[in-house]
Image (cartoon, rainbow, N blue to C red):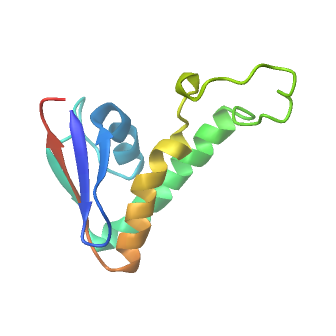
Amino acid sequence: MLIKFHSKAVAEVLMLSHNAAPLLRAAGKSFGDNVPERGVFTRDQLQAAIDGIEAAIAADERAHPGQNDDADDHDKAPVHPVAQTVELHQRAFPLLDMMRRSLAEDADVTWEATKGW
């Protein structure tokens, strides 16, 4: 399922539901196995949501230290970009940016699920 995040402050952010779910949980939304079809982060909830996602990123980086460190890999063949994993901080960046800009402009962030993906 494709999740579309909306805000009056910025363009849409699109994310597959299995990638969006951990970020939504880190941001304080609780749900079962599936991401709800619709949801909202009100202006008042945005700072706590941002803090939660940033804490999840920090915990992920502590759990996988040095994963992004290429300093010792000079003798290794480069890995093709398609074969590289996408880290949590990279996956979260568009949503975090949307939340920060929405908070600055006093706008809500909503999402809706699009079936068929």
Q: Is residue 72 above or below residue 104?
A: above
How many tags in the picture?
Answer: 0
Residue 5, horizontal then vertical, whole percent = 26, 54
For this rendering, which residue is in front, 97 or 31? Answer: 97
Query: Who's the residue at 49% across and 60% down the image?
Result: 51
Q: In which quarter of the image is the N terminus?
A: top left
Residue 110, horizontal then vertical, whole percent = 22, 59
Q: Is residue 71 above or below residue 53?
A: above
Residue 97, picture quadrant: bottom left
Residue 81, picture quadrant: top right
Q: In this view, does 81 lie above or below 90?
A: above
Query: Who's the residue at 23% across and 49% down the image?
Result: 4
Query: Who's the residue at 72% across and 35% down the image?
Result: 65
View extreme (bottom): residue = 105
Q: Is residue 88 visible?
A: yes
Q: Is residue 59 left or right of residue 94?
A: right
For this rendering, which residue is in front, 12 or 105? Answer: 12
Q: Is residue 14 left or right of residue 103?
A: left
Q: In this view, does 77 lie to the left or right of 54?
A: right
Q: Is residue 41 visible?
A: no
Q: Is residue 106 above or below residue 4?
A: below
Q: Quadrant of the C terminus?
A: top left
Residue 63, horizontal then vertical, whole percent = 65, 33
Residue 94, picture quadrant: bottom left
